[in-house]
Amino acid sequence: MTTVGVPAGWPATEEEARAVQDELRARVVLDEPGPPPGTGHVTGVDVAYDDDRDLVAAAAVVLDAATLEVVAEATAIGRISFPYVPGLLAFREIPTVRAALDALPCPPGLVVCDGYGLAHPRRFGLASHLGVLMDLPTIGVAKNPFTFTYDDPGPVRGSSAPLLAGTEEVGRALRTRDGVKPVFVSVGHRVSLDNALAHTLDLAPRYRLPETTRRADALCRRALQEASIRQAPTS
DNA sequence: GCGACAG
DNA sequence: ATCTTGTCGC
């Protein structure tokens, strides 16, 4: 497990953060299909917070895309680098997530983020931001529609419908389980929307959420617990 | 101005 | 995100 502070030059205000997004947005690559679904490595990343102790725990869990077995995992502990502001989530999560990815013993392959990529007020959500900074193929799978609207997909697993910002399609609502609320998939960096959907469906054969985010979520919570206990031991 | 708003 | 027990259902 590695420890990280707030990076030098990290945005301190919302205005600075938005300016960073407006500049980095130009580097997003949308014309690559990305790794073929079902092959290679797929890595889930997620973060847990302890606002009282100013702690962030991030986890990266690498799965074999064909079997969904865990191949490798890593965690990182950091300081909270930005408050939660809708549209600026990346500034809160990226430093620690990046450290966890750097600590992996193997290449992550496709990275699956808990949140959005293109589906973002300035079309530069967490998945796109992480992808550009680390030059990795990324997608975003979110649990909520954020500010977007969507037509309800058919009731059967695999059905999808456009996720809309006005009339612009910024992602898809994808049903991963029969009759269960869909997840919201958007492209991050260097992956097509069709492949993003195929990956997400492959990664969720049984539960609503992809195994990548389920594994990463469980691991970062464990890491946060251990870090909190270490900082405030019980006597 | 008011309300909504990924995690 | 996080605070949190039991409970309804396959």
Image: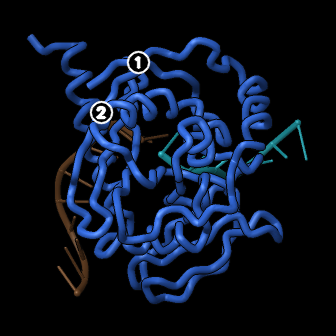
Chain colours: A blue, B cyan, C brown
Q: CA distance from mark 2 to mark 1?
A: 11 Å
Residues packed near mark 1 inside 10 Å, few (<14), some (14 to 19) or many (20 plus): some
Q: Mark 2 or 1 closer to N-term?
A: 1
Numbered tag placed on residue A177 in the rendering: none
- The C terminus of chain A, quarter of image: top left
Q: Residue furthest left?
A: A235
Q: Residue A216 appears at what percent x and percent y?
A: 32, 47
Give me the chain letter of mark 2: A
The quadrant in which residue A165 appears is bottom right
Give me the chain letter of mark 1: A
Question: What's the residue at 50%, 67% (across, down)?
Answer: A183
Q: Residue A227 appears at what percent x and percent y?
A: 25, 22
Task: Judge by depth and name the residue closer to the eye, A95 or A183.
Answer: A95
Q: Residue A28 appears at what percent x and percent y?
A: 69, 48
Instruction: Tell whether A5 sits left or right of B2.
Output: left
Q: Secondary structure at mark 1?
A: strand
Q: Amino acid under label 1?
A: Val
Question: What's the residue at 71%, 20% (across, down)?
Answer: A13
What residue sits right under mark 1 in the picture? Answer: A4
Task: Judge by depth and name the residue closer to the eye, A50 or A112.
Answer: A112
Question: What's the residue at 36%, 33% (across, down)?
Answer: A100
- The N terminus of chain A, quarter of image: top left
Question: What's the residue at 55%, 59% (across, down)?
Answer: A144
What residue sits right under mark 2 in the picture? Answer: A75
Instruction: Tell whether A201 sits left or right of A219.
Output: right
